Image (spheres, rainbow, N blue to C red):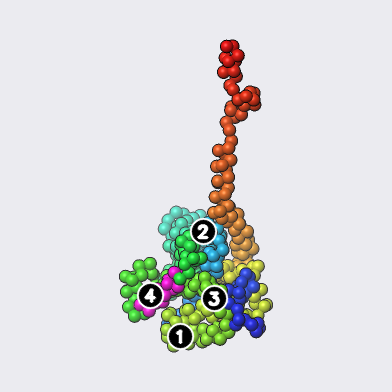
C-alpha cells in the first residue's frame, strides 16, 4: 500500500532511483500490446476501439504509456549526463536488441518458413527486392522501410490475408519515433534548456496541446503551423513523451498526491470513452501512470529493477505471433493463441535481456560513456604532455654537456 505521507512528497522523490514500479508497468504495457496484436494476427475481431469511439485501441494506449514513462526517464537521464554520455547510453539501450531481432527475423525465422513453403534454402538469400539483405538494409537505422521478406506470411497468415502484405514485425515502427524524441531531449540538453530554461519544455508541451486541438478541428492546419509534426504519429507519440519530460524537469515541484492521481485516472478513462482523449486524456494519463509507478506496493516495485524484459517482449511479440499464426495456433481460439505467444515471447525476451541487452548496458560507462569532460581532460593532458617532451637529440646533447654548449662550439672556444 502507498505510504501515508505520499501526498507530502514530490513525484521526483516518489520515483527516485529504481525504487518504483515503472518497470512493472512497462512489462504490463508490453503484455497489453501482445493482447491487442493477437486480434488481427490471429484473425479475431477487435472490439475495444469501438468503445472508445475509434479514439484508440489497446495497443495505442500501451504505446502511449511507454512514451509517457520514457519521456520522464529520458529527461531525467539528460539531467544527469552530458550529450556524449546521453547519446551513447540511449543507443546501447535501443540498438543492440533491435538489430538482433532483425537478424533473427532475416536469418532464423525467414529461411525456415521459406523452405516449409517449398523453396530451396539458397534461393532465399538471392539478391533481389524483398530479400533478407534488403530487409536489413531498409531497417537497420530504426526507420522501417521494409516490413516483409519474399512475401512470407502474405498468404499463409490471417494478417497477411487481411492486408495482402508480408509483415514480419509490425511493432518496430514506433522505435524511430522514440529515437526522434531522444534526439529532441539531446537538443534540449546541449542547449542547456533541461537545466537552465525548463520553461521551454512547458512551451513545447503547450504547442503540442494546441497541435492536438488543430489536428481534431482541421488536420491539415497542423502542417502549416508545426512543420515538424506533419506525421500524425509523431504528434500523437511526442505529446505524452514531452508531458513526461515536463514532469521530469519539474519533478521536485510536482506533488505526489493521491487525489491528483485518482482524478487524473478518472479524466483519462472518462475522455477515453466519451471524447477528448487526445487533448485532455493524454496528459492526465501521463500523471496517472507516473503516480502509479510511485505508489504501487513494494513487491511490484521490485519487478524490472535488475532485469527489464519489457523491451524484449515488445520487439519479439509480433514476430512470435506471426510465426505461430503460420503454424495455425490461432485455429484453437483467441486465448490459446495469446497464451502460446506470451510463453514463447517471454522466453525470447529473457534471452534478449540476458544475452544482448544487459551485456550491452554494461558498456554504458565505457568509451563515450565516460563523458565529454573525461575525453577533454585526456586529450588536453596528452597535448600538454607532448609539448613538455624535448627532442631526443636535445636531451642527449644536454646529458653529454652539462653546460648546454654543443661539443663543436666548445672545442672551437678552447682552441682560441
Q: Pointer 2: what residue?
A: 83
Mark closest to the chain's N terminus, 2 or 4: 2
Mark closest to the chain's N terminus, 3 or 4: 4
Q: Quadrant of the C terminus?
A: top right
Instruction: Check the image and report above or below for 134 versus 384.
Output: below
Q: Pointer 4: what residue?
A: 211
Mark closest to the chain's N terminus, 2 or 3: 2
Determine whether the residue tagged by mark 1 lies in a helix, strand or loop. Answer: helix
Determine whether the residue tagged by mark 4 lies in a helix, strand or loop. Answer: helix
The picture places residue 198, in percent across and down from the top left corner, at 48, 69
Q: Nearer the viewer, mark 2 or mark 1?
A: 2
Q: Give the CA separation, mark 2 to mark 1.
A: 38 Å
Q: Residues within 10 Å of mark 1 (few under 14, many from 20)?
A: some
Tell me, yes or no, if residue 44 can be seen here: no
Disc 1, disc 3: CB below 8 Å?
no
Q: Quadrant of residue 11?
A: bottom right
Mark closest to the chain's N terminus, 1 or 3: 3
Q: Give the CA separation, mark 3 to mark 4.
A: 26 Å
Instruction: Check the image and report above or below for 390 versus 235.
Output: above
Instruction: Check the image and report above or below for 222 versus 263.
Output: above
Q: Pointer 1: what residue?
A: 271
Mark closest to the chain's N terminus, 2 or 1: 2
Q: Give the CA separation, mark 2 to mark 4.
A: 29 Å
Which residues, given as a range, are shown in magenta?
200-215
Disc 2, disc 1: CB below 8 Å?
no
Q: Give the CA separation, mark 2 to mark 3.
A: 25 Å
Amino acid at each position: 500500500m502507498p505510504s501515508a505521507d505520499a501526498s507530502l512528497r514530490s513525484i521526483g522523490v516518489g520515483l527516485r532511483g529504481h525504487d518504483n514500479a515503472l518497470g512493472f508497468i512497462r512489462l504490463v504495457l508490453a503484455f497489453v500490446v501482445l493482447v491487442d496484436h493477437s486480434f488481427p494476427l490471429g484473425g479475431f475481431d477487435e472490439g475495444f476501439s469501438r468503445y472508445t469511439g475509434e479514439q484508440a485501441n489497446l495497443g495505442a494506449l500501451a504505446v502511449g504509456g511507454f512514451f509517457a514513462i520514457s519521456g520522464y526517464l529520458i529527461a531525467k537521464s539528460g539531467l544527469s549526463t552530458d550529450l556524449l554520455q546521453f547519446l551513447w547510453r540511449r543507443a546501447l539501450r535501443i540498438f543492440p536488441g533491435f538489430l538482433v531481432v532483425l537478424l533473427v527475423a532475416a536469418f532464423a525465422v525467414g529461411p525456415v518458413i521459406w523452405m516449409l513453403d517449398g523453396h530451396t534454402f539458397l534461393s532465399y538469400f538471392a539478391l533481389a527486392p524483398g530479400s533478407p539483405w534488403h530487409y536489413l538494409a531498409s531497417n537497420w537505422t530504426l526507420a522501417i522501410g521494409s516490413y516483409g521478406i519474399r512475401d512470407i506470411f502474405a498468404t499463409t497468415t490471417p494478417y497477411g490475408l487481411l492486408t495482402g502484405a508480408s509483415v514480419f514485425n509490425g511493432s518496430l515502427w514506433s522505435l524511430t519515433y522514440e529515437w526522434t524524441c531522444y534526439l529532441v531531449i539531446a537538443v534540449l540538453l546541449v542547449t542547456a534548456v533541461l537545466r537552465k530554461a525548463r520553461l521551454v519544455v512547458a512551451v513545447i508541451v503547450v504547442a503540442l496541446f494546441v497541435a492536438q486541438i488543430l489536428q481534431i478541428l482541421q488536420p491539415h492546419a497542423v502542417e502549416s503551423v508545426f512543420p515538424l509534426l506533419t506525421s500524425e504519429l509523431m504528434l500523437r507519440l511526442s505529446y505524452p513523451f514531452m508531458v513526461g519530460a515536463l514532469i521530469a524537469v519539474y519533478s521536485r515541484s510536482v506533488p505526489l498526491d493521491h487525489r491528483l492521481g485518482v482524478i487524473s485516472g478518472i479524466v483519462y478513462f472518462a475522455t477515453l470513452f466519451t471524447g477528448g482523449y487526445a487533448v485532455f486524456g493524454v496528459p492526465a494519463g501521463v500523471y496517472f501512470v507516473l503516480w502509479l509507478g510511485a505508489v504501487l506496493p513494494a513487491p511490484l516495485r521490485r519487478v524490472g529493477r535488475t532485469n527489464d524484459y519489457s523491451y524484449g517482449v515488445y520487439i519479439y511479440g509480433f514476430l512470435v505471433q506471426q510465426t505461430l499464426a503460420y503454424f495455425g495456433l490461432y485455429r484453437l481460439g483467441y486465448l490459446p493463441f495469446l497464451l502460446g505467444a506470451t510463453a514463447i515471447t517471454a522466453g525470447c525476451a529473457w534471452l534478449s535481456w540476458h544475452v544482448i541487452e544487459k551485456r550491452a548496458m554494461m558498456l554504458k560507462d565505457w568509451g563515450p560513456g565516460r563523458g565529454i569532460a573525461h575525453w577533454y581532460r585526456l586529450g588536453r593532458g596528452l597535448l600538454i604532455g607532448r609539448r613538455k617532451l624535448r627532442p631526443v637529440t636535445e636531451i642527449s646533447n644536454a646529458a653529454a654537456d652539462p653546460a648546454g654548449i654543443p661539443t663543436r662550439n666548445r672545442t672551437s672556444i678552447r682552441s682560441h
